[in-house]
Image (cartoon, grey):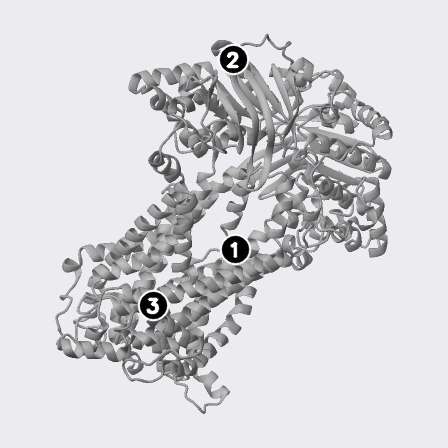
């Protein structure tokens, strides 16, 4: 899994992710206008002062797109990191502890997973107040059930290896087993999984924002921008398509990198198996 | 959207480790046999499904109660007087104990009564049943189109593995799973309605429309759903079939000098049925959830739209009712997937 | 008249694709030539990676995953099959050349009945009608000694035992009446008592049908029973090729000589017993409601090697799990140095754990692939003795010295080591704890014979140097002869015989030990016939069950 052996598709993906990340970090320097200032007429066409035109309130679309990268990347990344922390901690604890702890956690997880992610999010967000912190926690909590399932399967595969048994027999503690024996051997597949969950989080966040339950105005995020401008579509105003395309671009880039990660780790596995 | 979460593989690893672990003597096989009978396994899976349904109903009802936020306040707005709040709590029945309300809620649902909407005082059940058929029409037509397409394309990808058709399919499907549903929807509207003017928007259906009129109204929403689900289903079908094709018994068939077609039809297909049906069931579950977004995009009067509208105004009886319905469909489809794979296992169908 | 199969200057290469799209080529087989004539069997023998299976599959014009023939000729009855088109190749496979795989369990389609799969090739190639093929299958089932030949084909693969499946696979190969059969390690996955039955059935069937055969195996003793000629291969090249008698009795090459003499090492009589190190009384253990071990009692003297021998399912590995505390017994006691050990690992002190170390069958999975050799061997030093820094590195170097490996391995990862080196590192890791007892769970059965021999010699030398005791679990009587002082024979969860090695391995025997000892192939032509003859005699007297496999 060397960087040098990276295929062209993954290089494109990585470059795309970096581009979006740069936009997010240096938004105030890059964006021609501010995020929320009304600078022109409603739904001005592309070209002239406004490269991509203006939105439903007359704000510069390109500037909002650049600022939108911030909210979208930040919330999706924070949710994914949090969901991985929760999911991995619980799943590794379940595997290493075994017995009743494993049973309780796994059945509880099955229950949460029996309700579709979007539906669960709708129900919970209908009750809770709307702010970014709660949004991140809710997204992470829902997503962590998927991380738990994968994490448990991967950790279980490693935990039955003889070297883990040997460590138990040597008298090692749980922390050593988790951090020195199991974790290093699960990093490769989990890295691919992280990418997959990140792509999913971007889509999930965008969907929630599109439905009006995600990031709240006036903060710009790509899903919310689609919602703001969707009425324009029927009048031939394509302002809603630009943020949609931005989401698609970012997710495709992430998926290109993920594909490479998964293939690279799969071929590592295959190399071991031949007799 | 949630199809991305499910993977078809994962089972073999566990089985292998179980086999490695235990040194079960012949007697172990005998003791386990009654526990592994087909009927027992199916009954157990169905019992699990029902238990999950109950647990999910508790979660949907109880979880909502446990979360912070008082509905009476929400209902009346921040400036409501304490007296008004107390009155409205009583009116909505929020003053009764939770278990009592849960049982009466669940009892009502079992008889088709989902309670009364807080926002317009209509019967939730009536709305749900009316809209459910419209949503199912959308999902059903999408399924009818995407299932054969997915299996066909999946098989083409396998036949031409690592060659041009496979790569094209792989790149297109990667793109399709990366697009948000609403973006696909608006792209289609932009192209077919705005530029070509050959499709309708919004995709409204109403009572009294003939089936033909309905079908022509839902062309674009169906196309959106098909794009999303097809890509997922195709990718999973491809990997499921590839998994079977790389098995030792397919090599045996090849070394018998059988033709490629016969190998696929007689040796690969019977073993690929279970994983492919599982893939289909999982994606149907995803499809049902996918209608939520698509209905909002196309302003289609289905159950998804109903739920999203209710969520924005915090109309809890509607949110809970729709949520339970979606969860039930999802749980049942997952159960069907598991039962099919139990049924398709020759070891279980023909015990020793 | 041309030979049935004639291979000339065969060269086979594999193209390995990297994830980045680049690829590299590797030569698997180079300049190999041989002939097989009708009714004759050629044995191909060699270690893993010698290219045996690759050669066998070229007779069917088949290569697994990127393997392809790049030079030479494969003449089937005078015709070069490597030049055939797809259609031509298909008419060869299954009809004129058939293949018997190592794992019949995986090679049969789980979804179809055995009979249908057995007759498929004969019927599809238009060699026979379905009915004729069915009759021939029934006949072959009979020849191969399968139970109830008339109805055997009605069963599904999972409904019959491993030994029966392997014979059914032979029937499947023979059914179309091919000119040549390629047997690829057909008995390797079987227990010895099953192997002898399958071996006899295959030999009988070949003679009966007068087919030519390639018999691929890593076990010279097995191939000596069945083949007319033998070719010894190493790293894809021919080492020696000649009639079986010459190879076995007068090998010319040093490598062949080493292979032939391998099973002849034997350790002298057991030393006088010392104090008891490990004492097990009335042990019963198992999983859920099944007792895998029943009423086991044995005692292991200090500084000696106690071999536990048995076939798969005998409970010998479970015994090791009970001793280590991974599986607490239901009843019975384990005493170590006279003091009882807590039944569960969790309740044992670190000092108690230190005294018993373990060596696994698969060195690959016994070492964390993400740790360097210095950390793998060094960890017990830190954990048990608090050794760190320079002292630790010094001690690890000493241990590497002891296992005949140099300090250059300190910073390597397990993946960079050969199978034998990995097992040596595992031994060093066990030694680092300064244990009194090492449990060895088939430590050599995954290794090639010459490498395995090196490991056994190392273990014996270490025992002399450190006076450590071994509890050695194995299925191989030859290993017992080579290293044990005391022996316990296990069968279906019970110890059927135990004592000093010479006593256990000398008559009078109990039925099972007798069967086990007689089933181990010996490097001697005509051994199979002799054993079968003896067995038939026995059968007339006692009708003892020959089929020892579980079903």
* Residue closer to the observer: C317 or C94: C317
The picture quadrant where one finds residue C390 is: top left
Same chain check for tags 1 and 2: no
Which chain's residue wears label 3?
Answer: B
Disc 1 crowd, CA 10 A, few/some/many (<14, 14-19, 20+): many
Which chain's residue wears label 2?
Answer: C
Q: Which residue is mark 1?
A: B239
Q: CA distance from mark 3 to mark 1?
A: 47 Å
Determine the residue located farthest toward the top in the rendered image.
Answer: C272
Which comes before the other along the chain, label 3 or label 1?
Answer: 3
- Mark 3, mark 1: which one is toward the viewer? 3
SS label for mark 3: helix
Q: Is residue A42 left or right of residue C175?
A: left
* Residue closer to the observer: C34 or A198: A198
Do the residues under discs 3 and 1 have CB atoms within 8 angstroms? no
Question: x and y percent of residue B93 in the render?
Answer: 28, 76
Could you say which disc has been placed on residue B99 in the image? 3
Question: x and y percent of residue C325 in the render?
Answer: 47, 30
Question: x and y percent of residue B54 in the render?
Answer: 43, 65
Q: CA distance from mark 1 to mark 2?
A: 52 Å
Q: Which residue is mark 2?
A: C463
SS label for mark 1: helix
SS label for mark 2: helix
- Residue A207 vs C34, above or below: the answer is below
Q: Is residue A59 visible?
A: yes
The picture quadrant where one finds residue C395 is: top left
- Mark 3, mark 2: which one is toward the viewer? 3
The picture quadrant where one finds residue C551 is: top right
Determine the residue located farthest toward the bottom in the rendered image.
Answer: B208
- Mark 1, mark 2: which one is toward the viewer? 2
Identify the residue at horizontal 63%, vertical 22% (top origin): C488
């Amino acid at each position: 899994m060397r960087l040098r052996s990276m295929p062209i598709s993954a290089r494109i993906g990585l470059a795309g992710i970096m581009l979006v990340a740069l936009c997010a970090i240096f938004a105030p320097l890059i964006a021609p206008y501010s995020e929320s200032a009304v600078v022109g007429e409603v739904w001005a066409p592309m070209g002239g002062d406004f490269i991509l035109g203006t939105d439903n309130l007359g704000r510069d679309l390109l500037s909002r797109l650049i600022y939108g990268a911030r909210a979208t990347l930040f919330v999706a990344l924070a949710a994914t990191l949090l969901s991985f922390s929760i999911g991995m901690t619980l799943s590794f604890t379940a595997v290493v502890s075994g017995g009743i702890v494993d049973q309780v956690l796994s059945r509880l997880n099955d229950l949460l997973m029996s309700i579709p992610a979007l539906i669960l999010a709708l129900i919970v967000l209908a009750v809770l107040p709307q702010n970014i912190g709660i949004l991140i926690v809710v997204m992470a909590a829902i997503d962590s059930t998927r991380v738990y399932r994968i994490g448990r399967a991967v950790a279980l595969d490693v935990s039955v290896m003889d070297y883990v048994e040997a460590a138990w027999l040597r008298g090692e503690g749980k922390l050593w087993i988790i951090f020195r024996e199991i974790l290093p051997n699960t990093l490769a597949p989990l890295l691919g999984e992280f990418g997959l969950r990140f792509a999913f989080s971007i889509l999930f966040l965008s969907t929630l924002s599109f439905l009006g339950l995600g990031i709240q105005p006036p903060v710009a995020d790509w899903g919310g921008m689609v919602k703001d401008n969707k009425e324009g579509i029927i009048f031939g105003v394509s302002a809603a398509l630009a943020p949609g395309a931005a989401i698609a671009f970012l997710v495709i880039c992430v998926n290109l990198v993920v594909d490479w990660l998964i293939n690279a780790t799969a071929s590592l596995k295959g190399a071991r198996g031949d007799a | 959207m949630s199809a991305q979460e499910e993977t078809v593989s994962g089972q073999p690893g566990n089985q292998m480790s179980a086999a490695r672990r235990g040194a079960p003597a012949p007697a172990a096989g005998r003791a386990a046999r009654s526990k592994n009978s087909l009927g027992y396994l199916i009954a157990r899976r169905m019992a699990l499904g029902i238990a999950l349904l109950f647990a999910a109903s508790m979660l949907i009802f109880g979880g909502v109660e446990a979360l912070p936020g008082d509905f009476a306040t929400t209902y009346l707005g921040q400036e409501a007087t304490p007296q008004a709040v107390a009155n409205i709590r009583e009116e909505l029945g929020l003053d009764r104990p939770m278990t009592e309300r849960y049982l009466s809620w669940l009892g009502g649902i079992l008889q088709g009564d989902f309670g009364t909407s807080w926002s317009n005082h209509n019967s939730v059940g009536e709305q749900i049943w009316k809209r459910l058929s419209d949503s199912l029409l959308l999902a059903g037509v999408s399924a009818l189109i995407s299932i054969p397409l997915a299996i066909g394309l999946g098989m083409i990808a396998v036949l031409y593995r690592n060659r041009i058709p496979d790569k094209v399919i792989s790149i297109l499907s990667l793109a399709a799973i990366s697009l948000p549903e609403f973006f696909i929807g608006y792209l289609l509207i932009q192209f077919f309605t705005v530029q070509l003017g050959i499709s309708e928007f919004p995709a409204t259906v109403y009572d009294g429309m003939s089936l033909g009129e309905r079908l022509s109204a839902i062309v674009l929403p169906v196309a959106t759903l098909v794009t999303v689900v097809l890509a997922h289903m195709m990718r999973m079908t491809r990997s499921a079939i590839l998994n079977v094709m790389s098995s030792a018994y397919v090599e045996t068939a090849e070394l018998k000098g059988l033709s490629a077609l016969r190998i696929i039809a007689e040796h690969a297909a019977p073993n690929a049925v279970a994983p492919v049906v599982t893939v289909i069931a999982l994606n149907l579950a995803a499809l049902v959830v996918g209608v939520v977004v698509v209905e909002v995009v196309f302003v289609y009067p289905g159950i998804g739209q109903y739920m999203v509208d209710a969520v924005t105004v915090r109309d809890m009886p509607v949110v809970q009712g729709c949520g339970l319905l979606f969860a039930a469909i999802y749980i049942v489809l997952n159960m069907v997937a598991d039962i099919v794979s139990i049924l398709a296992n020759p070891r279980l169908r023909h015990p020793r | 008249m041309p030979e049935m199969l004639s291979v000339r200057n065969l060269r086979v290469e594999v193209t390995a694709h990297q994830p980045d799209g680049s690829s590299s080529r590797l030569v698997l087989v180079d300049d190999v030539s041989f002939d097989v004539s009708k009714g004759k069997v050629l044995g191909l023998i060699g270690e893993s990676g010698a290219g045996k299976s690759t050669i066998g599959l070229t007779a069917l014009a088949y290569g697994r995953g990127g393997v392809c023939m790049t030079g030479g000729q494969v003449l089937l009855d005078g015709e070069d099959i490597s030049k055939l088109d797809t259609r031509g190749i298909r008419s060869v496979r299954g009809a004129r050349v058939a293949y018997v795989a190592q794992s019949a369990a995986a090679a049969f389609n789980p979804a179809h009945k055995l009979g249908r799969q057995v007759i498929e090739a004969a019927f599809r190639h238009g060699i026979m009608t379905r009915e004729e093929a069915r009759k021939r299958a029934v006949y072959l089932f009979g020849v191969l000694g399968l139970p109830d030949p008339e109805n055997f084909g009605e069963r599904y693969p999972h409904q019959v035992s491993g030994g029966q499946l392997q014979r059914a696979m032979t029937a499947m190969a023979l059914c179309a009446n091919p000119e040549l059969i390629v047997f690829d390690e057909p008995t390797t996955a079987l227990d010895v008592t099953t192997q002898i039955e399958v071996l006899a059935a295959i030999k009988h069937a070949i003679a009966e049908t007068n087919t030519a055969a390639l018999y691929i195996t890593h076990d010279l003793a097995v191939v000596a029973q069945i083949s007319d000629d033998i070719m010894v291969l190493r790293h894809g090249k021919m080492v020696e090729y000649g009639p079986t008698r010459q190879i076995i009795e007068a090998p010319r090459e040093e490598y062949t000589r080493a292979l032939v003499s391998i099973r002849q090492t034997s350790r002298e009589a057991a030393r006088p017993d010392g104090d008891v190190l490990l004492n097990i009384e009335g042990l019963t253990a198992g999983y859920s409601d099944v007792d895998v071990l029943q009423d086991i009692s044995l005692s292991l003297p200090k500084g000696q090697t106690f071999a536990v021998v048995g076939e798969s399912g005998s409970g010998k590995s479970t015994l090791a799990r009970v001793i280590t505390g991974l599986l607490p017994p239901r009843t019975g006691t384990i005493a170590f140095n006279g003091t009882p050990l807590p039944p569960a690992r969790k309740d044992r002190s670190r000092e108690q754990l230190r005294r018993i170390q373990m060596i696994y069958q698969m060195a690959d999975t016994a070492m964390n692939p993400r740790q360097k050799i210095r950390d793998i061997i060094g960890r017990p030093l830190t954990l048990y003795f608090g050794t760190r820094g320079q002292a630790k590195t010094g001690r690890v170097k000493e241990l590497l010295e002891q296992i005949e490996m140099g300090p250059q391995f300190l910073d390597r990862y397990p993946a960079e080591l050969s199978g034998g080196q990995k097992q040596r590192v595992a031994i060093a890791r066990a030694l680092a704890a300064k244990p009194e007892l090492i449990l060895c769970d088939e430590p050599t059965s995954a290794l090639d014979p010459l490498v395995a021999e090196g490991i056994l010699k190392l273990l014996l030398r270490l025992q002399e140097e450190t006076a450590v005791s071994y509890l050695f679990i194995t299925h191989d009587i030859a290993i017992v002869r080579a290293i044990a002082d005391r022996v316990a024979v296990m069968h279906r969860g019970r110890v059927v015989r135990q004592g000093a090695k010479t006593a256990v391995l000398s008559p009078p025997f109990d039925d099972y030990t007798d069967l086990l000892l007689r089933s181990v192939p010996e490097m001697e032509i005509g051994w199979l016939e002799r054993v079968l003859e003896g067995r038939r005699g026995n059968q007339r007297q006692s009708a003892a069950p020959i089929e020892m496999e579980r079903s």
